[in-house]
Every structure is written in structure tokens, then in C-alpha cells.
Image: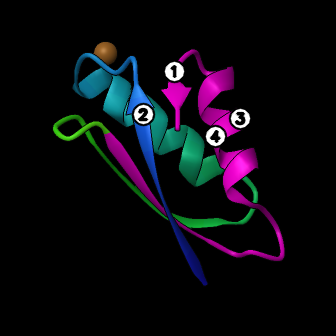
Amino acid sequence: METATLTVRGMTCMGCVNSVTKLLKAAPGVTDARVTLEPPKAIINYDAAKTNPAQLKQAIEDAGYEAA
Ligand SMILES: [Cu+2]
């Protein structure tokens, strides 16, 4: 199990936090995701055989947020 910590820009409220949490948890290979507004971060546990940080960033950006 790997852990990725991404900075997520563009979240303004708990609705955004919930949206990002949901999309990450629904992404292939993700086993858990914890998203916070302050600091604006996502801590993601994932199976490295099924996904990688680049794909996780892409999933966040597809939803209209910025990830780094
Ligand atoms: Cu919001």
C-alpha cells in the first residue's frame, strides 16, 4: 500500500472537500482518502499496482480542481 499526499487548489467549502473525497474513493486502486480544506490537501492510500499519483491528480483535475 502506498500513500500519496497532494495539494488540492480550488476547494472553497466542505462541499468541495466531500466531492474530492468521493471521487478519490471511487477511483480505481484507491483504498482510502482523507481530504482537508485547511490545509488544502488530499492524503490517499492506494494500490500501486492499480493506480499512481499522476492518475490521482488527473482524477482531481477532471473534477475541476488543481492538484500538485
Ligand atoms: Cu465547495
Mark 3 or mark 1: name the one nearer the start of the chain. Answer: 3
Whole-number angstrom distance, CA of label 3 to CA of label 1? 10 Å
Asked whether the residues under the numbered discs 2 and 3 touch, taking CB atoms below 8 Å apart as contact, a structural biologist would say no
Asked whether the residues under the numbered discs 1 and 2 touch, taking CB atoms below 8 Å apart as contact, a structural biologist would say yes
**Residue shown at 45% from the left, 30% from the top:** 19
Image coords of residue 67 (percent x, y): 53, 33
Per the rendering, the mark at residue 65 is 1
Whole-number angstrom distance, CA of label 1 to CA of label 2? 7 Å
Whole-number angstrom distance, CA of label 2 to CA of label 4? 9 Å
Compared with residue 16, is residue 23 higher up or lower down, i.e. above or below? below
SS assignment at label 4: helix
Amino acid bearing label 4: Lys
Asked whether the residues under the numbered discs 3 and 4 touch, taking CB atoms below 8 Å apart as contact, a structural biologist would say yes
Image coords of residue 68 (percent x, y): 52, 38
Residue 51 covered by magenta stretch: yes
Location of residue 37 (image quadrant)? top left
Q: Name the residue that disc number 2 marks.
A: 8
Q: Name the residue that disc number 3 marks.
A: 58
SS assignment at label 3: helix
Whole-number angstrom distance, CA of label 3 to CA of label 4? 4 Å
Mark 4 or mark 1: name the one nearer the start of the chain. Answer: 4
Compared with residue 1, is residue 62 higher up or lower down, i.e. above or below? above
| Residue range of the region highlighted in magenta in the rendering | 41-68
Residue 28 versus residue 49: which sits nearer the camera? 49
